[in-house]
């Protein structure tokens, strides 16, 4: 079976997961920036992975658009973020990002990653600084807001190869 992994990554977490996935499945692994010219119809299974960015799964729009022409292929979406894992993360991301007609067809898998301020671009750093400021200014913050403030205070890495188990099982069929 020929498998392809395409990933969108800025600070390296999604790239790490994509590379492990490709290694475990004997798949080809291509960065989103190099996607032009890839013949998707040459593969039996295709996984797309992107980072969460203010609720948006970066690059996923491209994947969903291409999915329309990939009938009969095994397709999967994975996405990384700073939020601790749980069903709600997946539900919210699918609701916000995936067109309704693809929801039964492309399963989505959340892989907990973390934050890397050292590798973040300037715009992202500013966005995170604004979020920290907003959370710090909250009067009587909820437990969720307190937890979020703790989580965005600095860099951390929650990447775990074990999170790939489900997406690998799905892609193997
Ligand atoms: C500006 C900004 C917005 C983010 N928004 C979210 C988000 O909505 N949900 C989440 O779980 N993580 C969010 N994150 C964390 C990233 O999704 C996380 O660091 C991701 O794993 C980065 O992937 P990459 O290293 O492959 O670029 C955000 C990070 C930045 C810098």
Image: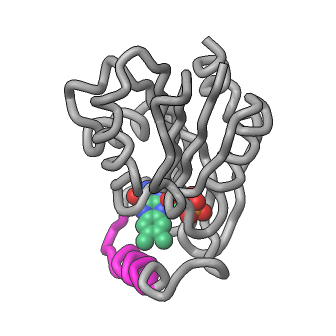
Q: Position of residue 115 (x, y in %)?
A: 60, 66
Instruction: Look at the image and give the residue range highlighted in magenta.
Output: 126-141
Residue at 66% over, 63% down: 12
Q: Position of residue 40 (x, y in %)?
A: 47, 36
Dominant secondary structure (helix, strand or loop) of the stretch shown in magenta: helix
Q: Position of residue 148 (x, y in %)?
A: 48, 62
Residue at 71% over, 53% down: 16
- Which colouring convention does the figure follow? one colour
Q: Which residue is nearer to you in this view: 34 or 97?
A: 34
Q: Is residue 27 magenta?
A: no
Quadrant into which the N terminus falls: top right
Residue 134 seen in this snapshot: yes
Residue at 65% over, 55% down: 15
Residue 146 seen in this snapshot: no
Horizontal side, residue 22 vs residue 146: left or right: right
From this view, report whether residue 145 is shown above or below residue 16.
below
Horizontal side, residue 22 vs residue 171: left or right: right
Residue at 64% over, 78% down: 119
Q: Is residue 129 magenta?
A: yes
Horizontal side, residue 120 vs residue 145: left or right: right
Q: Position of residue 147 (x, y in %)?
A: 51, 59
From this view, report whether residue 134 is shown above or below residue 69.
below
Q: Which residue is nearer to you in this view: 171 or 166?
A: 171
The quadrant in which residue 52 appears is bottom left
From this view, report whether residue 166 is shown above or below residue 24.
above
Q: Which residue is nearer to you in this view: 83 or 95?
A: 95
Number of residue marks: 0
Q: Residue furthest top?
A: 173
The quadrant in which residue 4 appears is top right
């Amino acid at each position: 079976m020929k498998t392809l992994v395409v990933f969108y990554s800025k600070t390296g977490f999604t790239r790490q997961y994509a590379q492990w996935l490709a290694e475990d499945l004997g798949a080809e692994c291509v960065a989103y920036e190099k996607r032009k010219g890839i013949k998707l119809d040459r593969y039996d299974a295709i996984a797309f992975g992107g980072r969460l960015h203010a609720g948006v799964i970066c690059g996923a729009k491209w994947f969903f658009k291409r999915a329309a022409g990939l009938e009969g292929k095994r397709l999967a979406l994975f996405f990384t973020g700073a939020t601790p894992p749980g069903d709600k993360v997946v539900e919210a991301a699918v609701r916000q990002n995936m067109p309704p007609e693809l929801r039964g067809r492309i399963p989505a898998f959340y892989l907990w990653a973390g934050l890397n301020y050292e590798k973040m671009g300037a715009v992202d750093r500013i966005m995170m600084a604004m979020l920290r400021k907003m959370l710090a200014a909250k009067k009587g913050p909820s437990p969720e807001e307190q937890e979020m403030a703790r989580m965005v205070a600095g860099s951390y890495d929650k990447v775990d190869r074990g999170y790939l188990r489900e997406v690998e099982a799905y892609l193997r069929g």
